[in-house]
Image (cartoon, rainbow, N blue to C red):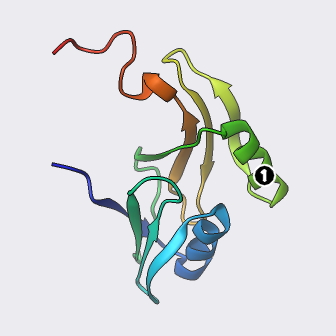
């Protein structure tokens, strides 16, 4: 099995579509006012947005996007007006992370983990 995509609920469809386009994702399906799908600039992953009438709230779901150039990417996004709740920070699990929210309140984590993403020192042995 391989993960195909995730779908994020959004309350402000057009503003959230613009947010992800401005972040550098490629819009591949645009069916306003309810659905949009994006391709990530690196790799094969995609994700979609689906309009909901209900506030997103704090779902505890976090969407992770890996960036090999994390610090430069965050600086570029901040210069473009993106507001981060957490600047790039080294974590005890050997990842470097920065966090922000999209206009609908979904939490995003931009991170760099390199080899530790799938092979941390505490990985379960096969």
Quadrant in which residue 99 is drawn = top right
Residue at the (15%, 15%) spot, across then down = 126
Residue at the (58%, 42%) spot, across then down = 67
Left or right, residue 91 beside residue 71:
left
**For residue 122, above or below residue 5:** above
Residue 66, image x, y percentages? 52, 42
**For residue 94, above or below residue 16:** above
Residue 46, image x, y percentages? 39, 62
Quadrant in which residue 51 is drawn = bottom left
Left or right, residue 111 beside residue 71:
left
Residue 44, image x, y percentages? 38, 57
Left or right, residue 7 beside residue 68:
left
**For residue 20, above or below residue 89:** below
- Residue located farthest toward the front when viewing the structure as drawn: 43
Residue at the (46%, 50%) spot, across then down = 58
Structural crowding at the residue carrying mark 1, measured as other residues with C-alpha within 10 Å and reported as few (<14), some (14–19) or many (≥20):
few
- Residue located farthest toward the bottom when viewing the structure as drawn: 32
The residue nearer to you, when weighing 62 against 21, is 21
- How many numbered marks does the figure carry? 1
Residue 96, image x, y percentages? 60, 28
Residue at the (45%, 62%) spot, across then down = 56
Instruction: Name the secondary structure under disc 1.
Output: helix
Quadrant in which residue 97 is drawn = top right
Task: Return the residue at label 1.
Answer: 76
Q: Residue 8: in sight, yes or no?
A: no
The residue nearer to you, when weighing 72 against 58, is 72
């Amino acid at each position: 099995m391989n993960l195909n995509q995730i779908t994020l609920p959004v309350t402000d469809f057009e503003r959230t579509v613009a947010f992800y386009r401005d972040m550098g994702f490629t819009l591949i399906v645009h069916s306003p006012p309810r659905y949009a799908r994006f391709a990530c600039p690196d790799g094969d992953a995609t994700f979609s947005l689906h309009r909901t009438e209900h506030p997103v709230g704090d779902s505890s779901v976090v969407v992770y996007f890996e960036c090999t150039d994390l610090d430069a990417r965050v600086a570029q996004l901040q210069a473009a007006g993106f507001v981060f709740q957490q600047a790039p920070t080294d974590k005890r699990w050997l990842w470097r992370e920065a966090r922000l929210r999209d206009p609908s309140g979904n939490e995003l984590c931009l991170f760099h983990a390199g080899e530790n993403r799938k092979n941390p020192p505490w990985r379960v042995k096969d």
